[in-house]
Amino acid sequence: MEISGIISAIVIGIIIGVLGRLVVPGRQRIGILLTIVVGIVAALIGAALASAFGVADTKGVDWIEWLIQIGLAAVGIAALDRTRVRR
């Protein structure tokens, strides 16, 4: 993976993490850095799943891939939020 691929994964991860956080209702008790990490992981896993299902390379915007990535980010953020102990 080249440096441009790493930078684009980070940028897309930030966007996916923020969108995933917006999908989860209520207040989340996780920080922005953890949200970004969840977004990056969700973007990578979502891209792999989209490739496996054959929907990664379509004409125009890959809406199905984005939906998979945002869904995974929302699940990851909700799971981390549930593991946090209220203080």
Image: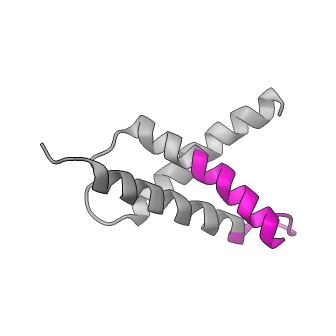
Q: Is residue 1 left or right of residue 71?
A: right
User: Which residue sits furthest left?
Assistant: 87
In the image, residue 36 above or below residue 62: above
Q: Position of residue 22 (x, y in %)?
A: 41, 60
Q: Is 68 in the magenta?
A: no
Q: Residue at x 68, y 41 (%)?
A: 9
In the image, residue 67 above or below residue 40: below
How many numbered dots are placed on residues in this image? 0
What colour scheme governs how the chains and residues are painted in the rendered image of this protein?
one colour
Residue 26 visible to an observer of this rendering: yes
| Image quadrant in which you'd find residue 27 | bottom left
Q: Residue at x 79, y 72 (%)?
A: 53
Q: Residue at x 70, y 71 (%)?
A: 64
**Secondary structure mainly formed by the magenta segment:** helix
Q: Position of residue 11 (x, y in %)?
A: 63, 40
In which quadrant of the rendered image does the C terminus lie? Answer: top left
| Image quadrant in which you'd find residue 51 | bottom right
Q: Is 55 in the magenta?
A: yes
In the image, residue 13 above or below residue 56: above
Q: Position of residue 43 (x, y in %)?
A: 64, 52
Q: Residue at x 70, y 33 (%)?
A: 7
Q: Is residue 68 left or right of residue 28?
A: right
In which quadrant of the rendered image does the N terminus lie? Answer: top right
Residue 55 visible to an observer of this rendering: no
Q: Which residues are magenta?
A: 41-64
Q: Position of residue 12 (x, y in %)?
A: 64, 46
| Image quadrant in which you'd find residue 23 | bottom left
